[in-house]
Image (cartoon, grey):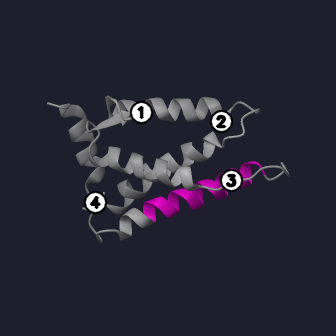
């Protein structure tokens, strides 16, 4: 991600902090009537970075628990499904929906900020890892 256009580290910082802040704001708004609710946003920032990297290279492996290589696009789809499903469970003390929103920011921001990325993503996805 440090090779993204617009600055070596500035885009990475925008993704990390943007994903964390946006996801916290959305989650806090959703839970505004819950006095015990707290959202910090750091893990959503990480989700944003992971999903941005998937946009640039969807077939690049992500190592699950550091051992099992999984193509980023499959890891991402599974992660989104898991975060959404777990976010619907009321008894959770983890803000899974913030992870989901951070991931969404990690996809939307680069797709809007970098001309041609959506075309690159689709072409890379269609041509497979070969």
Q: Nearer the viewer, mark 1 or mark 4?
A: 1
Taking depth in this image into account, of 115 and 77 the one nearest to the observer is 77
Say what secondary structure mark 1 lies in.
Answer: loop
Q: Residue at x 37, y 70 (%)?
A: 10
Q: Nearer the viewer, mark 1 or mark 2?
A: 1
Dominant SS of magenta comes to helix
Image side of residue 62 versus residue 41, left or right: left
**Residue 74 percent across, percent down from the top left:** 37, 30
Q: Nearer the viewer, mark 4 or mark 3?
A: 3
- The CA distance from mark 3 to mark 1 is 25 Å
Say what secondary structure mark 2 lies in.
Answer: helix
Can you identify the residue that label 2 sits on? 87
Q: Earlier in the sequence, mark 4 or mark 3?
A: 3
Q: Nearer the viewer, mark 2 or mark 4?
A: 2
Can you identify the residue that label 1 sits on? 65
Q: Is residue 113 magenta?
A: no
Q: Report the disc number at residue 115.
A: 4
Q: Nearer the viewer, mark 3 or mark 2?
A: 3
Taking depth in this image into account, of 12 and 122 the one nearest to the observer is 12
Taking depth in this image into account, of 28 and 70 the one nearest to the observer is 70
Q: Earlier in the sequence, mark 1 or mark 2?
A: 1
Q: Earlier in the sequence, mark 3 or mark 2?
A: 3
- The CA distance from mark 1 to mark 4 is 33 Å
**Residue 41 percent across, percent down from the top left:** 60, 55
Q: Which residues are magenta?
A: 14-31
- The CA distance from mark 2 to mark 4 is 32 Å
Can you identify the residue that label 3 sits on? 39
């Amino acid at each position: 991600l440090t090779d993204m256009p617009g600055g070596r580290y500035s885009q990475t910082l925008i993704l990390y902090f943007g994903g964390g802040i946006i996801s916290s704001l959305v989650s806090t708004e959703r839970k505004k009537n819950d006095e015990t609710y707290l959202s910090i946003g750091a893990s959503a920032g990480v989700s944003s970075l992971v999903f941005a990297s998937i946009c640039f290279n969807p077939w690049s492996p992500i190592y699950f628990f550091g051992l099992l290589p999984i193509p980023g696009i499959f890891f991402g789809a599974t992660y989104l499904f898991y975060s959404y499903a777990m976010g619907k469970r009321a008894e959770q003390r983890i803000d899974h929906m913030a992870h989901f929103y951070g991931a969404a920011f990690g996809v939307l921001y680069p797709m809007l900020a970098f001309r041609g990325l959506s075309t690159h993503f689709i072409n890379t996805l269609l041509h497979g890892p070969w």
